[in-house]
Image (cartoon, grey):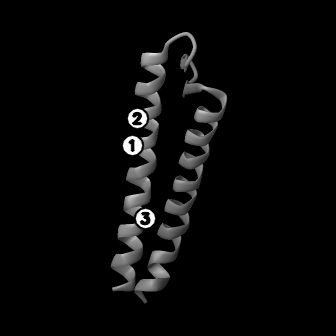
Amino acid sequence: MKYVIAIPFVLILGALVLGQFRIVRNAVKSRVAGAGRFTYSKDRNPELFWIVLLLETVGLFMCAVYLLGLLFGVLR
């Protein structure tokens, strides 16, 4: 029964991890990090670019750790 309950959570967290990974990958590839009005280019604002990229990467790791915790908790 716990597997049936965990399936929607795994799907949602998997989508979050995939989406955050794409955000970080595109930021590194395009050398522009942030969103909307708070977008920083590596060429114009390198300090803010690295800070925002670090925050995005921390978000990716938080989502991934939460997903792994859910998976290992359900499989235990």
Residue that carries the numbered disc 3 in the rendered image: 67
Residue drawn at point x = 41 percent, y = 34 percent:
54
Q: Is residue 5 above or below residue 51?
A: below
Q: Quadrant of residue 51?
A: top left
Q: Position of residue 18 (x, y in %)?
A: 58, 54
The alpha-carbon separation of the residues under discs 1 and 3 comes to: 14 Å
Image vertical order of residue 63 relative to residue 3, above or below:
above
Give the residue at x 45% y 76%.
6
Mark 3 / mark 2, whichever is N-terminal: 2
Residue 71 in percent (x, y) is at: 42, 75
Say which element carries label 1. helix
The answer to whether the residues at label 1 and label 3 have Cβ atoms under 8 Å apart is no
Q: Amino acid at mark 2?
A: Leu
Q: Quadrant of residue 43?
A: top right
Q: Residues within 10 Å of mark 1 (few under 14, many from 20)?
A: some
With 10 as the anchor, is 62 left or right in this view?
left
Residue type marked 3 = Leu
Quadrant housing the C terminus: bottom left
Name the foreground residue: 8 vs 76: 76
As helix, strand or loop, the secondary structure at mark 2 comes to helix
Q: Which residue is mark 1?
A: 58
**Amino acid marked by disc 1:** Val
* Image mark for residue 55: 2
Badge 2: how crowded within 10 Å, few (<14), some, or many (20+)?
A: some
